[in-house]
Amino acid sequence: MGFESVYQQALSRALRGEEQVRTAGTDERHLDCLLHPQKQPYVLRLQECGCGAGEEHCATACLFNAIVRDEQGKLTIDPELCCGCGACISACKAGNLTASRDILPVLDALKHAKGPAYVLVAPAFHGQFSSRVTPGKLRAAFRQMGFTGMVEVALFADILTLKEALEFDRHVNQEGDFQLTSCCCPVWIAMIRKQYPELMKHVPGAVSPMIAAGRAVKQLYPDALTVFVGPCVAKKAEAREPDIAGAVDYVLTFQEVQDIFKAADIHPEELEELHKDHSSRAGRIYAHTGGVSEAVRSTVEQLRPDRSIQVHAVQADGVPACRELIEAIRRGEQDANFFEGMGCVGGCVGGPKALVDAQQGRENVVRYGEDAACATPLENPFVPELLRRLGFDSIEDFLENSDIFVRNF
């Protein structure tokens, strides 16, 4: 029985509340990967690879040199180097690689949750589950799954936009100064940290919106279960990084959520509308390339319209382009002062587990941004309200003492 068959069978059992058992023909390793994904790499090898020397397409595609041959000459994935970008999965012509899946532990955690359970939905979500699935209907679908509520991570993208705008205002004051956005992309940050550590001084010490959302929920509800949902496999790796681990308990991809909806016979488009609106346009457009730059630029302009140096941004799309941009910065060939990198072409909407193509995803995100009641976090009344609930008395207090939104790279 192949991995996909084991996966579908295990998912059906979990939804029926049945114990997971190893049936005849089941590869025990496959079931263990599904039951204990936290003990596995972010990319799983389903069977031994038959590639000969020099034919390792997966290793060639990996820009982090995470795929190597072990002492027996077998290809293996080094979990210390792998950032979960998923490039190797697409490159593997034999189809021997797949992304780790967290569905079974999530369903079990929902069943045994001691406190509220919140799903944290990435800004790229709009339109992913069909054009008929509005944010309110998706919220209702997660309620039917067993979650207490749905939190749009775009609200925390608003908060991080404000933080990066304040950091830009503080540190970029003359020609030659620049900022490498920490944005929402763990692949971009992993590339800088692992391959260009000398540039980390230009990266504000901010967590991603995903981690900000998880930490905020945990601070307000210490017993809460937090599950992030998005198009990205690398978010699974980010959630386990030692300095930020614990903020997000599990990460599901859009594909995994769609699998649950299908197996549980949940039809979001038919459900009631549970409408809530907390994010600005700035936070919502984080999901496509250029969105972070535009969000910070518009916020800086609104914050300091008389500033002599405003945001001059350049973006890179995809891992090779990110590397080319960084090399150009190192050679002094870039005169911008704000650099945004997205590991996937198109940004998060181009993620490996998105359910619609990147262009359609971008159009959905742009439209959702245009529907926002406010343009920037400075106009969003929910930003100061949430910051107040988290214990911040002022913008200065937020900038100086925002440990919840800071990480030590």
Image (tube, rainbow, N blue to C red):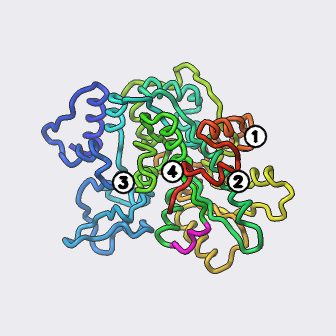
Q: Main secondary structure of the magenta part?
A: helix
The image position of residue 276, as x and y in percent, is 62, 28
Is 265 placed left or right of 157 in the picture?
A: left
Q: Which mark is residue 394?
A: none
The image position of residue 69, as x and y in percent, is 27, 71
Name the N-terminal-most of marks 1 and 3: 3
Name the N-terminal-most of marks 4 and 1: 4
- Dot 2: within a 10 Å radius of its alpha carbon, few (fewer than 14), some, or many (20 or more) residues? many
Amino acid type of the residue that numbered disc 4 sits on in the rendered structure = Gly
Amino acid type of the residue that numbered disc 2 sits on in the rendered structure = Val
> Mark 2 sits on what residue?
296
Amino acid type of the residue that numbered disc 1 sits on in the rendered structure = Glu
The image position of residue 282, as x and y in percent, is 69, 45
Q: CA distance from mark 1 to mark 2?
A: 14 Å
Residue at disc 2, secondary structure? helix
> Which one is in front in this view, the residue at disc 1 or the one at disc 3?
1
Mark 3–mark 4 CB contact (< 8 Å): no
> Mark 1 sits on what residue?
379
Mark 3–mark 2 CB contact (< 8 Å): no
Name the N-terminal-most of marks 2 and 4: 2
- Dot 4: within a 10 Å radius of its alpha carbon, few (fewer than 14), some, or many (20 or more) residues? many
Q: CA distance from mark 3 to mark 2?
A: 31 Å
Mark 4–mark 1 CB contact (< 8 Å): no
Residue 199 lies in the magenta-colored region: yes
> Which one is in front in this view, the residue at disc 1 or the one at disc 2?
1
Q: Which residues are magenta?
A: 196-202
Q: Which mark is residue 351?
A: 4
Residue at disc 3, secondary structure? loop
Name the N-terminal-most of marks 1 and 2: 2
Is 185 placed left or right of 382 in the picture?
A: left
